[in-house]
Amino acid sequence: MPLLDIIVFVVYLLLVLFIGFYFYRKNKNTNDYYVGGRNMGSLHVGLSVVATDVGGGFSIGLGGLGFLMGLSGSWMLFTGLIGAWLSAVLLIPKVIKQGHKFGYLTFPQLLKENYGVTVAMVAGIISFIGYLGFTSSQLLAGAKLAVGTFPELDLLHALYIMGAVAIVYTVFGGIKAVIYTDTFQWGILMVGLICVGIPIAYFSLGGWEAISTILPDRFLSMTNISWVQFANWFITIVPIWFVGMTLYQRIYACKDEKTAKKAWYIAGLFEWPIMAFMGIALGLLARVGAEQGLFLADGYATAAGMDPEIGLPLLLKNILPVGLMGLMVSAYFSAIMSTADSCLLAASGNFVTDILGMKENNPNAIKVSQIITFIIGLVAILIASFMTSVLDLMLLSYAFMVSGLLVPVLGMLWSKKKKPLAALMAMLFGGFSTLLLTFFEVNIPLGFDPILIGVLISLFLYLTIKK
């Protein structure tokens, strides 16, 4: 990569680290560290929510979907819009007042109020494991991007660099550093996609004539998807808006209900159609480039045999001029970091508050939180080093949390009769049945995702034991 691009990228990394160190001096306790003092505004929180949810995994993953199936891949983020707006209407009014009143820092603390200590502890463990895997998926996304754009790096070294930067500013800055860097990084991503990546790729590859000539019609259709595939995305992604620790942290961080709802509406619109079509479009253009032989020097004569998730980084490397390449790489790293930092902090919050049970008034709370965040980051890097697919790892983490936590959360919100044993069994059998079905590659009828079976098992146990 040319020196100018490297300088642009290094400046971006230094700015991100500066934000982390700036807020390091402003964090007085775990209330500041995990929920930002509960006085954040809707725009910053809304952009942070969408940056966290879409982020790098979906950015690189969407590029892979665009490469594989074209415009129909955008339906994945339509489920994000549905989830955001449903939770704004159904969830936020029920949890924000309680969260502020009792000073909650995590999502399982709500469950503790309704189901007791044991259920909250198990929920904390499930959420922690899920977000540990999710953090790993984001670091892997960054490593794949780095390998595609920095030929001198191998995947493992790229993973170490990505992990180091994300860990450092998250460890020091806490949630305010995360939210403000998310806003900054989301701005970079939008400018990079709208003003640089998409227009340059479109005209460099030959515009609409090349796209329509090279790609089969199904790539330009919104119906190149089965109803089962959409259902799998729906049952995996929509429920995460009700059980995601990163989202509860941001609800608690908002100053009031109106602010939180507005933030969620902003997030939904940015998910679909804005980010959905931009991410898919670049993946689709990468497919055009591959079929034109653009990646021949990288070892790929056509799209056949390529890792779909590497197509987008290779496209950027081959079409962008000096200077703009550094900006575009920074844009995609921004997306990746904005999710990795949030997931890392969520896992840390679960471990410190729900598993260790540390109180806010503990004089060592901030220091312990930072140490735990650092250790979790190192473990996430280790996990990522053994994985190959960003989207698979990300969706598996989603599935584990959703199938274990969704039914008890819905019961907490709307059931008058709350039985701790029902919630506990629903969590354990729901989450781990999904993992077992996935690891043993059990074929589910009609091609449904194992998460459906996990949720149904969880629901059956909850309703049976609750009677």
Image (cartoon, rainbow, N blue to C red):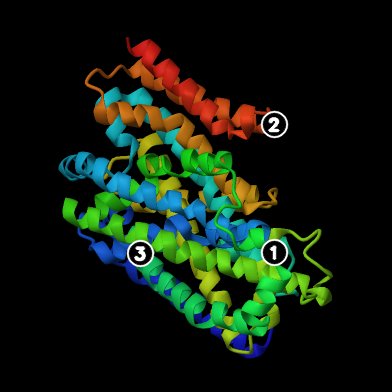
Name the quadrant of the N terminus.
Answer: bottom right
Residue 297 placement, left or right of 132: right
Q: Nearer the viewer, residue 274 or 111?
A: 274
Q: How far apart are the alpha carbons under marks 1 and 2?
A: 25 Å
Amino acid carrying label 2: it is Glu
Could you tell me residue 350's position as x and y percent? 40, 41
Q: Nearer the viewer, residue 407 or 73?
A: 73
Question: For residue 47, which quarter of the picture?
Answer: bottom left
Dot 2 falls on a residue whose secondary structure is: loop
Question: Would you name the residue on which mark 2 appears?
Answer: 441
Question: For residue 102, which quarter of the picture?
Answer: top left
Q: Is residue 148 above or below residue 38?
A: below
State whether residue 198 appears in this view: yes
Q: Residue at x 81, y 58 (%)?
A: 305
Amino acid carrying label 1: it is Ile
Dot 3 falls on a residue whose secondary structure is: helix
Mark 3 crowdedness (10 Å alpha carbons): few <14, some 14-19, many ≥20? many
Question: Would you name the residue on which mark 3 appears?
Answer: 47
Residue at the far top in the pictured view: 467
* Mark earlier in primary sequence (1, 3): 3
* Mark earlier in primary sequence (1, 2): 1
State whether residue 146 appears in this view: no
**Discs 1, 3 touching: Cβ within 8 Å:** no
Q: How far apart are the alpha carbons under marks 1 and 3?
A: 26 Å
Dot 1 falls on a residue whose secondary structure is: helix
Question: Would you name the residue on which mark 1 appears?
Answer: 310
Q: Residue at x 35, y 68 (%)?
A: 180
